[in-house]
Image: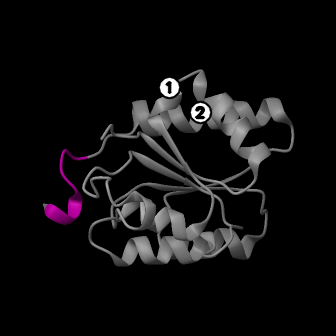
Amino acid sequence: MVRKSILLAEDDRNDELLTLRALRKGIDPADVAVVRDGAAVLDYLFAAGEYTERDASDLPRVLLLDLKMPKLNGHEVIERLRADKRTRDLPIVVLTSSDLDRDMAQSYRLGANSYVQKPVDSEKFRQAVEQLASYWLRVNRIPRQSLSQV
């Protein structure tokens, strides 16, 4: 199966479309996998449920994670990913509309690598997503193997 560079966890269709549109400028849309709830994030990453054919060892370069999602919220997802050695090192960027300090603090406490509040203005939103993709896919360096395997 083809490796996806970004896993986008977003339940709002409008935000999904805005994000995908912004990502098209920097990467091939085929390099983005989209899931719409917290349980689907875990299924995708651990090759369970509808994703059993996926190679669970083939992790995306970054997870863009909304906080307010059905089934499992973003904080529950972060907690489960950081508790599992297979996903402990996966870069997680919280991309949310929440500007609450407690959401930000909790995200970092649980192990998020970055917290970005979604700009309301569509042009600023596009720029923010483009910058995120550029940083995590072009600038940021990751080890050839997971840090948990080193």
Residue at 67%, 38% in the rendered image:
19
Residue at 32%, 75% in the rendered image:
84
Residue 107: percent from left, percent from top: 58, 70
The residue carrying pointer 1 sits among few (fewer than 14), some (14 to 19) or many (20 or more) residues within 10 Å by Cα, namely some
Asked if the stretch drawn in magenta spans residue 90, the answer is: no
Question: Residue 47 appears in which quarter of the rendering?
Answer: bottom left
Q: Which stretch is magenta? A: 143-149
Residue furthest to the left in view is: 150
* Closer-to-camera residue (117/78): 78
Q: Is mark 1 on a helix, strand or loop?
A: loop
Residue at 69%, 44% in the rendered image:
16
From the viewer's perspective, tell me whether residue 34 is left or right of residue 103: left
Q: Nearer the viewer, mark 2 or mark 1?
A: 1
Query: To which residue does mark 1 refer?
Result: 27
Residue 82: percent from left, percent from top: 39, 73
* Closer-to-camera residue (136/25): 25
Count of numbered badges drawn on the protein: 2
Gap between marks 2 and 1, in whole Å? 12 Å
Q: Is mark 2 on a helix, strand or loop?
A: helix
Circle on res. 56: none
Residue furthest to the right in view is: 121
Q: What residue type is labelled 2?
A: Gln
Q: What residue type is labelled 1?
A: Ile
Query: To which residue does mark 2 refer?
Result: 131
Residue at 33%, 37% in the rendered image:
2
